[in-house]
Image (tube, rainbow, N blue to C red):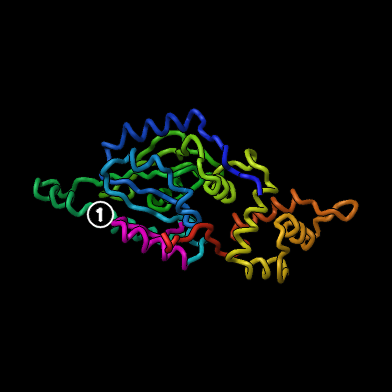
Amino acid sequence: MSDIGMDINWFPGHMTKAKRKIAEQISLVDAVAEILDARIPVSSSNPDIPELIGNKPHIVLLNKSDMADPKTTHEWIAHYKKKGITAIAVDSRNGNGTGEFKSAVISVLSDRLKKYEEKGMAGKKLRVMVVGIPNVGKSSFINRLAGKSKAKVENRPGVTRGNQWYAVDDRLELLDTPGVLWPKFDSKTVGEHLAITGAVTDRILDTELLAMRFIEILKAGYMPLISARYGIAELPEDSFDALCAIGKKRGMVIRGGEVDTLRAANMLLEEFRNCKLGRITLEGIDFSA
């Protein structure tokens, strides 16, 4: 298998500006909510975030949890808890889990709230910065919390270009920030997972190789879902042959009896991204670590 993702560079000029904006405005907020993709908690966590937010209280929101394996999501929440980080499984589209956010903010800021009360500032608004990589669902989360669709939302990387404030209620305000990726993905796996979920554009990768890598992940833990979706009891060991088998089942055969593997690859990735294959998590907890 080719080293997909090893040399991906993805750092447009607006991301440099966004990173600078986060650094400039971190002093304005009481806490930071980092939104991750529940299907890839490791790969969707920007390694620059800890340095940018410093010692600000930190809440992790595992978004798109409705598309992720619920058992693995539960394990991730427990993992963060052991590290002293509050983590919540949320589904911004349907609102599941978003109701827990306010209480989580109050909990992590309990010491600050106590100080406000002692100073006669009990009604002071709490401000939370929302950060995350492109296409992870920041704007959808803010829209859900604020009860209005003022934050620009689109299923395309890099939509939000400026930092904007949104009032959730008379006690809580959220600062939306543009999605920020880091200059280079040193890990092949990180690049693959971001591409498979659609966080980075398909155009920078070989779609067929990406689909083949995804098939390897599916074969390792989600073969029953493949069987149910495509009517294939067992996939060939070779990933290219497996992609051909899936394409053939979907009637993607061209002149000469060959399978249109590019079409099959696009179909497979889109069905994953639209949760038509079932609830799948690409990254689990490494209990051996």
User: Which residue is most to the front?
Assistant: 288
- The magenta segment is 71-91
Going by the numbered disc 1, the residue's amino acid type is: Val
Which residue appears at 14% of the width and 52% of the height?
Answer: 114
- The extreme right residue here reads 256
Are there few (<14), some (14-19), or many (20+) residues within 10 Å of tag 1?
some
Of 284 and 137, nearer the camera is 284
Q: Secondary structure at mark 1?
A: helix
Q: Is residue 100 left or right of residue 41?
A: left
Image side of residue 272 versus residue 25, left or right: right
Q: Position of residue 95 (x, y in %)?
A: 44, 59
- Viewer-side residue, 216 vs 255: 216
Magenta residue check for 36 = no
Quadrant (top left/top right/bottom left/bottom right) for the C terminus: bottom left
- Determine the residue positioned at 74% across, 60% down: 246
Question: Residue 214's spot in the image, x, y percent?
Answer: 62, 55
Q: Quadrant of residue 99?
A: bottom left
Q: How many numbered tags mark residues here?
A: 1
Q: Is residue 287 left or right of residue 114?
A: right
Q: Is residue 69 above or below residue 108?
A: below
Residue 72 is a magenta residue: yes
Residue on which disc 1 sits: 108
Percent position of residue 176, x then y: 39, 41
Which residue occupies the foreground of this view, 217 or 16?
217
Whether residue 105 sits left or right of residue 275 in the image: it is: left
Residue visible at 57% across and 48% down in the picture: 192
> Residue 261 at x, y = what percent?
76, 51
